[in-house]
């Protein structure tokens, strides 16, 4: 068991609708040691891929993505969920994304200034459930003509269909922790990661 899995067992709380609350180390208060270990794990896996940019979505993807970007020594770029007035006159890539936890739709946006066809992108997020956020980020990268090296996830709920959607689209998914089930308020991991 890696330190992320151990922390999920120790501090994760199971909520209705198969939502795992990890506010004590990932989604509200941030444990830098856990983030650092996740970033190392992703780096070992993707270090030969020629990554030039880490792409995530606000808000909860930002913390892990910064650590990952620092490890790869490349910039971190996050999709915004609301168009700020400062971006209005710029050209943006945009995609509609449904939020699993908030049950809302938002048009995520990334300025064309920061992503282009020379980039090789690693998509990073805190959770993978039905793959909406990751597929939205993949679409943004594809609109830019960038290559997608893969999708790196802190906590994957592998009983939901996000992984399959991304694989069907032709990209790799790598997760630091893979949860097989949250039934009876009990976290069970897949074998291996
Ligand atoms: P997806 O887009 O893959 O359906 O869901 C992933 C997104 O929803 C992540 O960006 C994450 O913020 C949120 N999310 C999905 N499932 C969970 C969960 O069990 N716990 C938490 N804290 N966030 C989740």
Image (tube, helix red, strand yellow):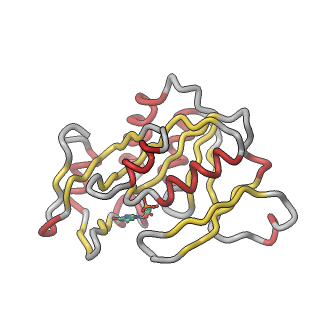
The x, y position of residue 73, in whole percent, is: 60, 33
The x, y position of residue 188, in whole percent, is: 16, 54
Q: Nearer the viewer, residue 70 or 86?
A: 86
Please tell me which residue is depicted at 70% across the width and 56% down the height of the picture.
110
> What is the quadrant of the N terminus in the image?
top left
**Figure check: 119 above or below 156:** above
Residue farthest to the top? Answer: 48
Q: Count the marks: how many?
A: 0
Residue farthest to the right? Answer: 89
**Figure check: 131 above or below 50:** below
User: Left or right of 11: which side holds 84?
Assistant: right
Q: Nearer the viewer, residue 97 or 66?
A: 97
**Figure check: 157 above or below 147:** below
The x, y position of residue 117, in whole percent, is: 73, 36
Please tell me which residue is depicted at 63% across the width and 39% down the height of the picture.
53
Please tell me which residue is depicted at 74% across the width and 40% down the height of the picture.
116
User: Left or right of 27: which side holds 122?
Assistant: right
User: Left or right of 26: which side holds 64?
Assistant: right
User: Residue 85 occupies which quadrant of the picture?
Assistant: bottom right
**Figure check: 5 above or below 102:** above
Residue farthest to the front? Answer: 168
The x, y position of residue 44, in whole percent, is: 41, 28
Q: Quadrant of ligand 1?
A: bottom left
> What is the quadrant of the C terminus in the image?
top left
User: Left or right of 44: which side holds 134?
Assistant: right
Q: Nearer the viewer, residue 35 or 152?
A: 152
């Amino acid at each position: 068991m890696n330190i992320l899995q151990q922390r999920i067992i120790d501090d994760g709380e199971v909520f209705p609708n198969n939502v795992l609350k990890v506010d004590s180390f990932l989604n509200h208060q941030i444990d830098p040691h856990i983030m650092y270990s996740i970033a190392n794990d992703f780096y070992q896996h993707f270090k030969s891929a020629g990554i030039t940019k880490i792409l995530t979505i606000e808000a909860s993807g930002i913390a892990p993505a910064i650590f990952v970007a620092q490890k790869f020594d490349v910039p971190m770029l996050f999709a915004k969920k609301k168009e700020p007035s400062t971006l209005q006159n710029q050209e943006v890539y945009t995609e509609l994304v449904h939020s699993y936890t908030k049950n809302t739709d938002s048009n995520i946006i990334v300025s064309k200034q920061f992503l282009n066809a020379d980039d090789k992108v690693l998509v990073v997020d805190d959770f993978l459930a039905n793959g909406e956020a990751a597929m939205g980020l993949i679409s943004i990268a594809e609109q830019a003509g960038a290559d997608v090296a893969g999708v790196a996830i802190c906590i994957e709920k592998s009983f939901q269909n996000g992984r399959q959607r991304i694989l069907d689209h032709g990209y790799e998914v790598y997760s630091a922790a893979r949860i097989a089930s949250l039934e009876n308020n009990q976290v069970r991991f897949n074998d291996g990661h």
